Amino acid sequence: MSGQATVLVVDDEIRSLESLKRVLSEEFEVICAKDAGEARRVLESEIVHAILCDQRMQHETGVDFLKHVREVWPDPVRMIISGYSDSEDIIAGINEAGIYQYIAKPWHPDKLLDIVRGAVQLFRLQKETETAGIDMKLTPERVKRVVTEKRGAARQLFDFDRIVHAPDSPLRDVIELGRRAADFDISVLITGESGTGKELLARAIHYGSSRSGKAFVVENCGALPDELLESELFGCKKGAFTGAYQDRIGLFEVADGGTIFLDEIGETSPAFQVKLLRVLQESEIRPLGAQRVRKVDVRVVAATNRDLEAEVRAGRFRRDLYYRLAAFPLHMPALRERPMDIPLIARRVLDEVSKAYGRAVHGIAPDAMSRMQCYDWPGNVRELQNEIQRMVVLADHGQLEDRDLSPRIRSSGAPITLRNGHGNGHHNGHGNGHGNGHSVGATLKIQIEALERLMITEALDRHGGNISRVAGELGLSRVGLRNKLGRYDLRKGVSRDG
């Protein structure tokens, strides 16, 4: 169950204040203030989602108070409640105070609850989509419709099936485990080198889960010092520390009901780890400078490129936090461990980049692809994406060619080349090639797959894409050859009669 929202009720009539609290306490945490001064003191010390204020109060009207609130604490959704005789004055001040709803007396309890539910929903949707400056007159229904459309698009974009991999890729088992984990409300720890797609897998887990209708929030834990990281995750009150110039709603609260992705969790300090552990154990946060704790219902998916078990043994990472986060561990293999995925990823990226850049580049030459498969990609998929982008910009022909590759990739080893079935490639990189065209440092499996791909490519060229003739030359069955064509993304080289 999601955490309760906090509603500040301001009214100088005690009986009215008690009536409002009695109704709203069914669903919300209610803080009462008998005048504007007391309400300001509450706003200085607490995170508030919505304010319900009476118009007729001693010393200051509700509209004047909410005008000041809008300037100093713009986040809470503001509502005013009053008699019909005040309506003209209130309507005149609605725009200046950014009032979301005018509630006329006498109010009905069910109607009041509906209005406050809508205000809280609007607050949360605005925070989730980072639209705090949105016009407060916009209805929650309209905001919800926009957010729902975005979530639907994200669900399709980050589906497990969108994670590109070959049928025999080691990534296949990881994705299957991720699908299973998505069905259960369990903490997931994703390990792997930078650029392997840990966040992509985390998003797929979220959008494949029962929490997909709520927020997916990301925080890079290695990018901020402890105090700022606490402020980002748990929230803070204005003035809680140097640099806290305004109230901040923490990302744990933004993700209430959904998922928070804590990237680079291994970079956090032991002091911060203690605070995070308490949040995970108690399912509650305390914004910096605030007096009250807030209940939250959040699924945590964490990621790291460190060996956290080694960090635990070295005393740099808390053992209890590790086991709390790693209830369901997943490991993303490096790109060099899955060369069979490189043609598929490269083609997907090429299609997307060519369309985005308006370039008519629609293929990758075999020798360029061979060299890509021989390169070890220390930056993993992210490096491959950047390389394809660069090549598309440089390409002056209909396909990406070997000469378009970056010098570091071309110097890592020449692609294997075959003529009439005999290897005669050369090595042009480090001066220790032996006339066999292999890539220095490449694994045997990578070299064999690159050789196999080029043998098939050249046989297709010689026989015009005829499957029967190519299979006969290479000593393969037609079915076996077709499987390899799919594996190496070579189907475009096949003729219709093949």
Image (cartoon, rainbow, N blue to C red):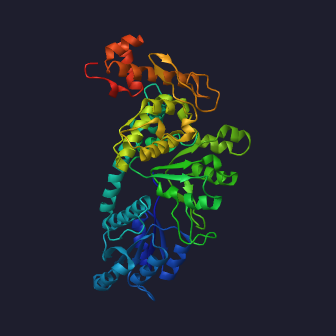
From this viewpoint, is residue 409 visible?
yes
Residue 391: image x %, image y %? 45, 43
In the rendered structure, the answer to whether residue 49 lies left or right of residue 93 reads: right
Give the residue furthest to the left. Answer: 497
Picture quarter with the C terminus: top left
Residue 241: image x %, image y %? 63, 69
Which residue is nearer to you in this view: 268 or 474? 474
Hey, which quadrant is residue 411 in on the image?
top right
Give the residue furthest to the bottom. Answer: 59
User: How many marks do you count on the picture?
Assistant: 0
From this viewpoint, is residue 159 visible?
no
Which residue is nearer to you in this view: 141 or 437? 437
Residue 355: image x %, image y %? 34, 46
Which residue is nearer to you in this view: 76 or 479? 479
Residue 227: image x %, image y %? 63, 61
Please determine whether, in this image, residue 116 is positioned above or below residue 170: below
Which residue lies at the image location 39% right of the left edge and 19% below the top edge? 459
Please determine whether, in this image, residue 483 is positioned above or below residue 110: above
